[in-house]
Image: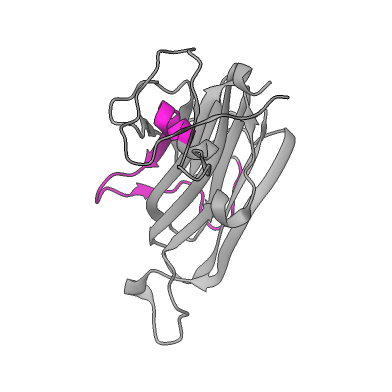
Amino acid sequence: MAFLKLKARQTSAISTASEGADVYARGLRDGTILTAEWILAQTIRGRLMCAQAGLLTTAITWTATATNDQTKPAMFIDVPSGTTIFPLEISLYMEAYGSDALFECAAMTGTGGVSAGGTAMAITNMRTDAPYSTNCTATSDITGGTACTANISSFWATGLQMTATIASADDASPRQESLHVWRYKDSGYCPIVVGAGQLMVTQGSQAGTGFGKIIFIEVPTTEIT
């Protein structure tokens, strides 16, 4: 009869093994098994990435104004063939909205999207020694790309019925929210972009500026197929 055998490691040091070697599962002395959840395990491997738009006090001027234009996304990640990403968090911090207007932002995945113009986003490995480099390309404030054309999944949408930059607001203006966030942990699911494919984050405002961030796990597609 097969059974799972643990190595009790409650106070003693945990030794490392060579790549591919057989090891014991780790447990406490009472037999409780200890495991690392998948996201943490991928982070330890060096597969967690961060794409950033804007830096410190230098905000991005978003190209799309007034409407949530999918040909002018605020942030765009192009995932090449052979690579797969799992978005975990998307944030859009609005430093300015412009004058009173509807604000909306959304995120979607699909295929057939193309970036054109805009500003390159830095993609960094969230392990400081960066054992892996990204295969993806990220762009912000795109000036006129191509929206995704197939298998489009719009998985996040939010906004404000009316908002304005504080400097131009008056007593009748609503409360100003500046940070808009989607998280895998909150929604309970995440889209999977199997390359070739794209992840787009769009925004519509009267004259928006701000910062954006996308946190994602990146792995070779062969690991999930």
x then y, percent, for residue 73: 53, 43
Instruction: Determine whether, in the image, residue 212 is placed left or right of residue 161.
Output: left
Q: Position of residue 216 (x, y in %)?
A: 49, 37
Foreground residue among 33 and 151: 33
Establish if 40 lies above or below 223: below
> Which is nearer the eye, 125 or 112?
125
Residue drawn where x is 57% and y is 57% of the image: 186
Residue at left 51%, top 28%? 218
Extreme-left residue of the structure: 57
Q: Residue at x 59, y 40 (%)?
A: 71
In which quadrant is the N terminus drawn? top right
Residue 20 position (above or below residue 219): above
Query: Which image quarter: residue 84?
Result: top right
Image quadrant in which you'd find residue 191: top right
- Residue 58: horizontal and vertical position, in percent? 27, 48
Examine the rendering and report whether any part of residue 73 can be seen: no
Q: Which residues are magenta?
A: 41-70
Residue 20 visible in the picture: yes
Viewer-proximal residue, 34 or 100?
34
Q: Quadrant of the C terminus?
A: top right
Picture coordinates of residue 151, whole percent (x, y): 75, 35
Q: Is residue 66 magenta?
A: yes
> With respect to residue 193, does 68 lie above or below?
below
Colouring scheme, one of rainbow, by chain, secondary structure, one colour: one colour
Q: Quadrant of residue 16?
A: top left
Horizontal arrangement in the rendering, residue 31 relative to residue 16 (left or right): right
Which residue is pictured at 56% across the width and 29% down the height?
A: 5
Q: How many marks?
A: 0
